[in-house]
Image: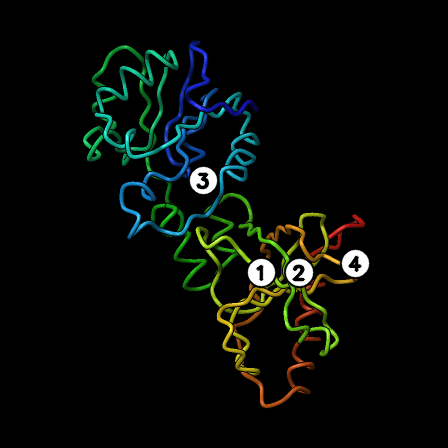
Amino acid sequence: MKLTWLPDAEVRPRRIAIGTFDGVHRGHREVIAGADTVLTFDPHPSLVVHPESSPRLLTDLDRKAALVAELGVQEMVVIPFDGAFSKQTAQEFIDHVLIEKLGATHVCVGDNFHFGAKAQGDAAMLAADGRFEVRIAPLIEVGGLPVSSTRIRKLLRDEGDVRQAAELLGSPFELTGMVVHGDKRGRELGFPTANIVPDERFVTPAHGIYACRTGQGRAAAVSIGVRPTFQTGRGVLIEAYVLDYSADLYGQEITLTFVDRLRGELKFDGIEPLIEQMNLDVAQTRLAVPVGDASGA
């Protein structure tokens, strides 16, 4: 799939799906179905228009592009969203972006899609234009509720329900961060961990222990929380114990694919019961995550 920034796009007839598509969840996939081009925004418009209330995101641009590519889309066109673009009227968006720049012949959006300054444009405005065909995709429901990025964020942030989040997303949730030096506590306990610093712009699942898969297919038992047994005062930590792997990961970026939540965060009365529980967590991780044959983490 070709990734193009809007200023570099060449005019050609396009079947365009438009949206922020954070997470590229099952509802987004209904919008994208049949499109040869996905038109999206970076950064997320809320970061520019309402930065004080902007939600943490599910995907960065690279992850979004990878998920869109899996759907057979030919091109993803990215609008560099800034203060100037946020002031563009809905009619200007149709005239200058969809028609003049991209040559839209077909446009698909979700039925709750809004665009243009002060979100004055909507699906009905697109349908009334007449210069391109319009398909308005209905909301997809799972469990009697609409699938939305907001619902998925809540599942992850408040409940750590990575299984349900994956069902709504259509693929497992991923988190990427840089491995940094910690206080070596895991090594002292017999479970050397990679301390991961996530990007604060993105969702972090609720405190607890998770079975994950690394980018190279290895299983990892991952702890997210404040380590109440030790009262470190260091804030939220993400620590990944990569099973059967001992190479140095410091300074590397690592991607964790969340498979299941094993339990909530607990405070133990001492080191021995903690180690006993960590052994159980590792055993559960082995059962939950098939181990790949890759040599790297």
Q: Earlier in the sequence, mark 4 or mark 3?
A: 3
Foreground tag (4 vs 3):
4
* Image location of residue 62, percent across then percent down: 54, 37
List x then y, in percent, for residue 118: 19, 35
Q: Give the mark nearer the N terminus: 2 vs 4.
A: 4
The type of residue carrying mark 3 is Arg
Q: In the rendering, which numbered label is found on residue 288?
A: 2
> Which residue position is annotated with label 1?
260
User: At x 31% / y 27%, what residue is drawn?
Assistant: 136
The numbered dot on residue 179 is none
Crowding near pointer 4: few (<14 within 10 Å), some, many (20+)?
few
For marks 3 and 1, the one nearer the N-term is 3
What is the spatial separation of the Cα atoms under label 4 and label 3, in whole angstroms?
A: 37 Å
**Residue 39, located in which quarter of the rendered image?**
top left
Label 3 packing within 10 angstroms: few (<14), some (14-19), many (20+): many
Q: Amino acid at mark 2?
A: Ala
Say whether marks 1 and 2 touch (CB < 8 Å): yes
Q: Which mark is residue 247?
A: 4
What's the residue at 64%, 82% (across, down)?
A: 274
Mark 2 closeness class: few <14, some 14–19, many ≥20 residues within 10 Å = some
- State the SS at label 2: helix
**Residue in the picture at 27% in, 46% down:** 50
Please provide percent x and percent y for residue 254. 64, 52
Query: Left or right: 61 with respect to 90?
Result: right
Residue occupied by mark 3? 26
**Residue type at the position of mark 1:** Asp
* Mark pair 1, 2: CA separation: 7 Å
Quadrant in the rendering for residue 22: top left
Q: How is the image coloured?
A: rainbow
Circle 1 SS class: strand
Please state the horizontal and vertical placement of residue 240, each as a whole percent of the image: 64, 63
